[in-house]
Image (cartoon, rainbow, N blue to C red):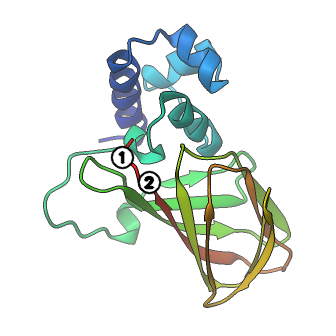
Amino acid sequence: MDLGKIIAMNLKRLRTDRNLTQGQLSKISGISKAMLSEIEKGNSNPTINTLWKIAKGLNVTYTQLMAEIETDMTVVRREKTVRQSGEMGHYRIYCYFKSTPVRNFELFYAELDGGTSNASIGHSEKSQEYVYIIEGELLLRTDAGAYLLRQGDALTFDSTIRHTYINDANTCLKFMIVNYYPARI
């Protein structure tokens, strides 16, 4: 099924489960009512930060907006992952595993073009982020400080705070991200 249609179904279900109108969700998420309507109709391909804002407004994990029914054993092929991009297209993530009722984490492969950055809004309450550098060098700026990570390095931090991924090199940065939700949302 098309990712836009999956997001549309999940957004409508999650919003109505909470007895929220589109107007109410608009106020708590910071996403316009018109945009929410387009997403619920499956007519929009929302950006990463748009989905984060909606998820935070609904108090759900990012990937609950993209969840499909999975079997007990799942093989995810790279060519089957869906590419999502930041607003400018220089930051790309590929979701390998989504948060589900029995999985309280999400696993992403990420790429950040050289000489660019991507700011991420804070994630859901009590969430933690784990970053592992595959190739390149990442400068991660958070409200708690700045951290330089090189190939093979890893870092965990409180992802409820704003954070920015920065690639000062000329080459593409490749890294893995695990978003972990200790308390089920």
State left or right for residue 15 relative to residue 86: left
Query: Would you say the residues marked 2 and 1 are in contact, meaning their CB atoms lie under 8 Å apart?
Result: yes
Q: Amino acid at mark 1?
A: Arg
Q: State the SS at label 1.
A: loop
Question: Which percent across, then down, holds residue 170?
Answer: 84, 79
* Residue at left offset 82%, top offset 64%: 116
Instruction: Report whether residue 174 is seen.
Output: yes
Question: Which percent across, then down, holds residue 136?
Answer: 71, 84
Q: Residues within 10 Å of mark 2 (few under 14, many from 20)?
A: many
Q: Residue furthest left?
A: 72
Q: Which residue is mark 2?
A: 181
Q: In the figure, residue 150 lies in which quadrant?
A: bottom right
Quadrant where the N terminus is found in the figure: top left
State left or right for residue 20 relative to residue 2: right
Report the front residue among 162 and 26.
162
Q: Residue furthest bottom?
A: 152
* Residue at left offset 73%, top offset 50%: 162
Q: Which residue is mark 1?
A: 184
